[in-house]
Image (tube, rainbow, N blue to C red):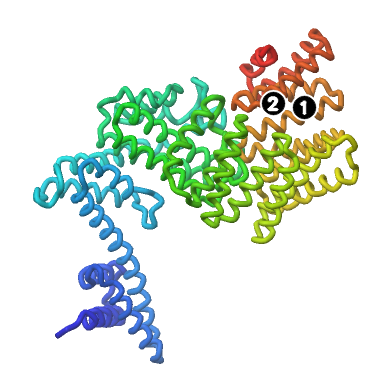
Amino acid sequence: MTTLRDRYFATIDTLVEMTLAGRVRSKEQIYRRLERDVDAGTGEIFEACLSERAAQFEAESGMKATRKLRATATISSEFERWQQNNRDSGDRRRALTDLQRTEPEARLMAIVRAIDPNRENAWNAARVAEFAQQLLDFAESGEPDDVTGDTNQLAELGNGLRDGLRVYRELEDVIVSWIYERTAGSLGFGETAQRAGPWAIWAKRCSSHTIAELFATIDRGEPIVDFIRRRRDFDERAWLELALLLQGLQRGLVSWFDRQPYSIDAGKQVSSSAFLVFGAIWGQIAEGFASGDRSGLADASFTMSIQILRAFARRDTFPLYGGVFASFGGDYLSDTLDYLERPLQRVPGTQEKARILTLLGYSQAAIGNYDRAAAFHTDALDTARTAADRPCEVASLNHLSRLCATQKQYQDAIDRAQRALITARQMGDRLGEANALVNLGYSQVLRQQQTERPDAELYESAIAYLNDGLDRAEKLDDRQSLALGCYSLGVALVTVDRPSRAIDALTRGLKFARESGDLYLQGKHLLFLAEAHYALDDELAAIATASIAAFSLERIDAREWRQAASLLSALRGRLGAEAFAEIFERARKQVVAAIGVEGYEAIDDLLDR
């Protein structure tokens, strides 16, 4: 009786002899023979036989043995391709079988899990297309006894997947075309009604009326929740069409941004914005379905949001020490954070959750929600420790240190910075160590400023920590940490009455903050640049910089805008209204270049407020 091993040895020997005789014209010929002769689920047996033959050939000598080894190497290469394709095919067959046996109300969620980009063997567009066709074929020819519930639903789900791939192909060539037409580094998801962005262009090109209306809604800055709530005709097929399209658009944007050099307008830092924008969209879609009592579609939408957050948290470029505000502004930022927070509440303690919590904590601090920010970072710290994510643990301690410093709890800030420093050094986390040194020096300077008799030596020691942390961040070429380090050093130098040196540090840091895409950090740099110019009695520079800072910070709802406006008020009081107005007019060109005519004209309103 011929065994499976005998069969596979015979296949290998035949392919080797055909290769030696020159009868193999291409690798595809070997692949087709493997498809014919190797049974699904028996790849390990074939691989063992191939390894055994290769070992025999290695023991032989001469030119023929060398040629046999080359032949087995070619067979091995094509076998790897066969294994990959066989795994994909088997994966789709299992997904189809599972779907047939799943209750109708749970099928959409089963497909959402199948197309999850975080899976080890994630499906590409070709695999999704093949699965869609399998669903349609089964719905047309399958026996009713083979499926739980109505086969028509399987056909509709298959059509939804196919429709999603079709509308994506319609938009594929305009995914990034809008970037060359925009006037600012925005993904078109901010609070301003008239702005450059992808949504209007995508809406015009999309053949799906419902999706085109959704994109137009986003472009106008109108609530997605209300749009979804009104669309009672949004069924599972339409939902899958939208899901496949948004997945493709997000993937295309991120891929394009990742290939760009470091810049303010486009680059890996803007990829982070893309993840958050699409995550927030799905959060709002989920809320719209939930408020309309369509729980199945709501749960699927929340799951899509979670999948995006997890994919974002796994990236090497995930911003453990900063936030991403390039695409958000004002109350819209706060709403977006809420939408992102809700799906995260459903996720158990994981490494990905800990990292997203650090981002949400930083973002809440930016809009002045310090208690909420502290809760996020504390939760992130606990979750990171449970998940043994030491870099995230160090980052959480560093964030808590800065929060404590912001709230004038300087000893607590120093304690957390020291714990972060010790932990970072134990594990060799150079980025965490750089940030901890900066936080330690920053907190010590601010604490000294609160004492009745500041110690000059302690000031110098604290500034040495700041310079050390900044040097380390520079060696790592981490823009976010460089920006934080320069900002902290600038604040310290303003505090100890060295405004000229502060301007140098803050000017340098502002460049890094812009490159990192962090609007909050940019605004804070501008604020203390204005303070430094004020200390040097440079009224023109102080007024111009404080105006830009006040408008920029107010746009993202950061409470520090009032500090910049207060500085302007102090200057107006010192100079008198007429002299202030004259200098403000002289600063017009600089201010308009930074924040536009709208920003220039808004300063009077900010001063009144």
Q: Is residue 66 visible?
A: yes
SS under mark 1: helix
Tell whether 570 sits left or right of 18: right
Task: Tell me the quarter of the picture where residue 460 sits.
Answer: top right
Q: Residue at 45%, 31% (x, y): give it.
A: 198
Q: Residue at 63%, 20% (x, y): give it.
A: 596
Could you tell me residue 94's position as x and y percent?
24, 57
Q: Quadrant of the C terminus?
A: top right
Few, some or many C-alpha atoms within 10 Å of disc 2 (few <14, some 14-19, many ≥20)? many
Q: Which mark is residue 474?
A: none
The answer to the question of whether label 1 and label 2 lie on touching residues, with beta carbons closer than 8 A, is: yes
**Residue kind at label 1, given as amino acid type:** Ala
Which of 523 and 365 lies nearest the eye of the viewer?
Answer: 365
From the image, tell me which residue sits under label 1.
530
From what the image shows, is residue 212 above or below residue 16?
A: above
Which of 245 and 414 lies nearest the eye of the viewer?
Answer: 414
From the image, tell me which residue sits under label 2.
549
Q: CA distance from mark 1 to mark 2?
A: 8 Å
Could you tell me residue 388's position as x and y percent?
54, 57
Q: Quadrant of the N terminus?
A: bottom left
Could you tell me residue 50's position as x and y percent?
32, 79
